[in-house]
Amino acid sequence: MEITYWNKNIETMDRPAIEALQLQRLRELVDQSLKMDFYKNRLLRVGITSSEDIQSLDDLRRLPFNVKDDLRQNFPTGLLAVDMRDVVRVHSSSGTTGIPTVIYFSRQDMDNWTDLLARSIVATGCCQDDVFQNMMTYGLFTGGLGLHYGAERVGMTVIPVGGGNTQRQVQIMKDFKTTVLHVTPSYLLHIHSKLESFETRPEDLYIQRVFLGAEPYSENTRLKLEDLYGIDAYNSYGLSEMNGPGVAFECVYKQGMHVWEDAYILEIIDPETGEILPDGEQGEVVLTNLVRSAMPLFRYRTRDLAYVNSEPCRCGRTHRRLSRIQGRTDDMLIINGVNVFPSQIEEVIMAIPEVGTNYLIHLTKIGSLDKLAVKVEIYSKLFTGDMSALDGLKAKIKEKLRASITINPVIELHEPGALPHSEGKAKRVLDEREQL
Ligand code: DLL
């Protein structure tokens, strides 16, 4: 396989060089943070008074963690490290669960972020010849504009469609012979269920590669999408607090996402104790942004659960890889006392060929017992009126789920389009236990 790099020197740096660069940048970050009231108080409390206190990367663990609430409490400008006139971009989380979290970028920050995205895009084998259709929402969400700038820097032909309007998306794919898509996995699944109504077959499209991210999805969903469209799908991870996308991205080998370690320090911790876990063990992802001048942020607890693969990658990149996000510390469901991650359910149902492109996990309560219903859309050709075939399919899904999650779910089969769908991040769980 041909391997292309955006910045070969940095991407293939040996480990000691990466760590030396991280240490230098960490020390700069500490000095910069000591100039800000919020961080200064926290750092002084743990006895850090200057970058002299950071002698090795191990000293990172002396720094306190930061969490989403710290950003909220400092809304809107408490964590801004520069004059507002030096800020060239603001992004923010949607704020649907409370006060939004705001992220500021200086011109240098924008340049660094864009470069990380260009690097990510080239790692998947894309180049200037590609036509890039960006179906992520433009606006305060980082998914749209982030990749937009990165793709332009690579020199791809960028089509900034944004999310939604499925028929137009498909028409644009055909008109401009789009070769690369950026989209949430749930929306790409949904688009497939609509193709027939637009008299389009996947073979009529020119898509070769797709960047999937912004929401959790299982390996079986990736395989299903690759199969349905005949594409290569690459996992892309990031979060607004760490700029947005471009924290970690898969290379052509698709065996985990390279975390750009010249720009971020990655730690995996035990979410209960805060103890740092060795490579290979699953825990909470903690990230330090080493190159953001307008809004420094260190040891940020993401709540995402994953593990690190430090084996060398065949692509030659030396930056360690992050596994698929296995779930979030705050999305684990406790169903009649059993811990279940929605991703476990998705992993099972997406491997069943009859299951279509949408599903919903619905939780209710009957008396004191939790009831789990898994609603799945199946392909319309299966609704032939043969009830015993449908009953057989239900039983099959139920049995596979029971074997995996040890809970007996109720299975509902639906026609394509019957369940709510999203054009951005999907809401896969409807938990109505509290209200009942
Ligand atoms: O979703 C940034 C992004 C945009 C990433 C486009 C990739 C592509 P937020 O809205 O702040 O930022 O949401 C961040 O989304 O903490 C994860 O829980 C989840 N997430 C993002 N990428 C993935 C992924 C963007 N590849 C939150 N797999 C993160 C699983 C993901 N979860």
Image (cartoon, rainbow, N blue to C red):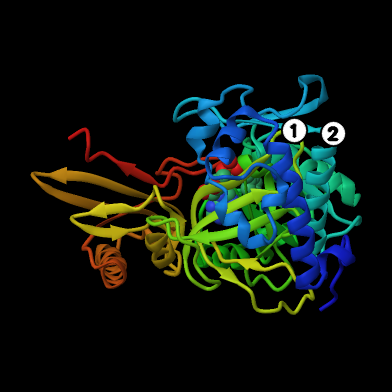
Specify the amino acid type for callout 1: Ala
Count of numbered circles on the image: 2
Residue corresponding to mark 1: 294
Mark 1 close to ligand 1, CB under 8 Å: no
Residue corresponding to mark 2: 107
Q: Residues within 10 Å of mark 1 (few under 14, many from 20)?
A: many
* 157 horizontally vs 45: left or right: right
Specify the amino acid type for callout 2: Arg
> Measured from the top left, where is residue 155 in percent x and y?
91, 49
Query: Looking at the image, is mark 2 or mark 1 earlier in the sequence?
Result: 2
* Residue occupying the point 53% across, 39% down: 45
> Which sits in the foreground, 67 or 224?
67
Q: Quadrant of residue 43?
A: top right
* 333 horizontally vs 233: left or right: left
The quarter of the picture where the N terminus appears is bottom right
* Residue occupying the point 66% across, 30% down: 36
The CA span between labels 2 and 1 is 9 Å
Relative vertical location of residue 237 with respect to residue 313 in this rendering, above or below: above
Relative vertical location of residue 239 with respect to residue 7 in this rendering, above or below: above
Res 246 visible = no
> Which sits in the foreground, 340 or 49?
49
Element marked by disc 1? loop
Res 129 visible = yes
* Residue occupying the point 62% across, 28% down: 37
> Measured from the top left, where is residue 281 in percent x and y?
48, 71
* Residue occupying the point 75% across, 72% down: 15
* 145 horizontally vs 13: left or right: left
